Amino acid sequence: MTTANNPATLTQSAAAILANADCVEKCRLTRVLAADWFADRVTETGGTLPPDRPARPSRPQLLPPKEMPKRAYGGERGRIGLLHALAHIELNAIDLAWDIVCRFPHEQMPKAFLDDWVQVALDEAVHFEMLQELLASLGATYGDLPAHDGLWQAAEKTADDLMARLAVVPMTLEARGLDTTPVTMERLTRNGDTVTPPALDVIYHDEIRHVAAGYRWFVHLAAKRGLDGRSEYHRLIGERFPGGLKAPFNHPARAEAAFPRDWYEPLAR
């Protein structure tokens, strides 16, 4: 039982957040746990493992990626569709960050690793809340449209290996956001949207830090296992992300994340 004199461990609290289906409460609990962790009110990591799947609200309807309806572009309807898709990504990203905190205790990662992913979880919660506010300003809310389960499927495919998780999630899926977000911001600005691009700019700059953390800890693990990091990244992407990477790449943003071109460019399809 958690009391003031016997606080929950980091992994106990993280697993509880994963088990909470309410998006608003998930974000609130993320803020509380991050504040407690960084203020040293929670100091023990613990060994609580995450659930196989995070709890999800009854809406949105989750569909296979191939069955998703075609999204509208332009106008208010298109903006709602974009914001809803991004909010779904950010909600998954909160859970992905807490899952990585809990799922790999056998790796005995240093506290700095936990610090990074607690911060990532907090960033993603802020992003979700920001996007939810933008949806509300348009008379919509998260759950109004269907969404796909591709992000969590990527988590399931990498649940056995921390290096694989880092390779696929921050170093590939999140790095893809660095490639696409500036183009999206430019298109929205051309269409007269002055509200969404500033929010996307916040997400974009946070994603650079997230990709940097993924690369940094991937290199750490490669050295720990006596592996060549670049070769291992290529091997893992070939196994776990066989479609390859999609060009064009945002080389300046990836360079800011210290992600070398010769790691990802040869994998372009």
Image (cartoon, helix red, strand yellow):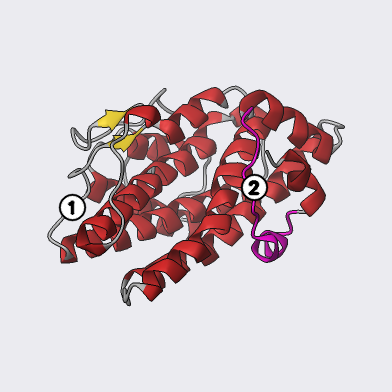
Foreground residue among 265 and 103: 265
Image-quadrant location for residue 107: top right
Image-quadrant location for residue 197: bottom left
Q: Amino acid at mark 1?
A: Thr
173 sits left or right of 190 in the view = right
Q: Provide residue 236's location: percent of width, then percent of height.
A: 70, 29
Residue at the spot of label 1:
141
Comparing labels 1 and 2, the label whose residue is closer to the camera: 1
Q: Provide residue 243's location: percent of width, then percent of height.
A: 61, 31
Circle 1 Cα neighbour tier, 10 Å, few/some/many (<14 / 14–19 / ≥20)? some
Circle 2 Cα neighbour tier, 10 Å, few/some/many (<14 / 14–19 / ≥20)? many
Residue at the spot of label 2:
214
* Magenta extent: 242-259
Foreground residue among 70 and 7: 70
Q: How many marks?
A: 2
Spatial CA distance of label 1 from label 2 is 31 Å
